[in-house]
Image (tube, grey):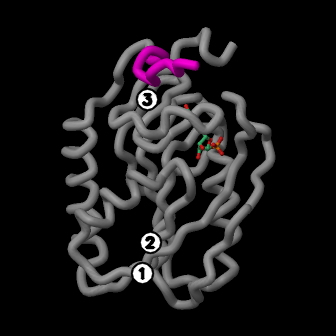
Amino acid sequence: MLIRSPEQDIQRILFTEEEIAARVAEIGKELSARFAGQKPLMLCVLRGAAFFFTDLCRKMDCMMDMDFISASSYFDGTKSSGTVRLMKDSSIDMTGRHVVIVEDIIDTGLTLSYLKKLFAVREPLSITTVTFLDKQTGEPNRENVDYCGFLIPDEFVVGYGLDYADYYRNLPYIGVLKEECYL
Ligand code: IMP
């Protein structure tokens, strides 16, 4: 059986590989300045933020610890389930640490506010939030994120780590998925 290429399911490209690399380098520079002389604990929210996280950390000029956590408010669909599940926690002690949560995309904002609350009780020195994409959903009372790669319209996007039903993560750019692929 011949399986089609993921490219065929993309309606249009929002950000190219080059645009992504340039923006990630800018955020890396800002975070390097923010954490100069510090040793932040960088937390990657799996699996969507994996590529962003590894690219970003390589653009940061400071000592750091890295860990990987897994949380999800999506279950194979394109809509949030409304509840967040923590599938993998960090094993690193956060007490007195500068904790940086790195997300792929903010949609309803539920995942991020859940993680912030969860880690705040562990008495870190600070919690900084970074997202690659921020979806303009007009969600009321959504928490502000400290650093954001790009603002995007309220459409379902894939690539650069973001998936639909676990596919398309390996696309090197951010694209809008054709509606017929998930309807
Ligand atoms: P939130 O809790 O509603 O902010 O959802 C955040 C999570 O939903 C992200 O970490 C993604 O895994 C997923 N998500 C939201 N929008 C999209 C999208 O357009 N494409 C792929 N995943 C998305």
The answer to whether the beta carbon of the residue marked 3 is less than 8 Å from any atom of ligand 1 is yes
- Counting from the top left corner in percent of width and height, residue 155 is at 53, 22
Q: CA distance from mark 2 to mark 3?
A: 24 Å
In the picture, measured across the screen, residue 31 lies left or right of residue 175, that is: left
Q: Quadrant of the N terminus?
A: top right
State how far apart marks 3 and 1 are (Cα): 30 Å
* Mark 3 or mark 1: whose residue is earlier in sequence: 1
Marks 2,1: beta carbons within 8 A = yes
Q: Which mark is residue 152?
A: 3
Q: Is residue 148 above or below residue 54?
A: above
Which residue is tagged 2? 42
Distance from mark 2 CB to nearest ligand 1 atom below 8 Å: no
What is the x, y in percent for residue 85?
77, 56
- Look at 44% across and 21% down and name the residue there: 5
The amino acid pointed to by label 1 is Asp
Of the numbered discs 2 and 1, the one sitting upstream in the chain is 2
Question: Where on the picture, by quarter, is residue 10?
Answer: top left
Q: Quadrant of ligand 1?
A: top right
Label 2 element class: strand
Q: Residue at x 59, y 88 (%)?
A: 93
Q: In screen coordinates, is 62 left or right of 176?
A: left
What residue did someone put label 1 on? 65
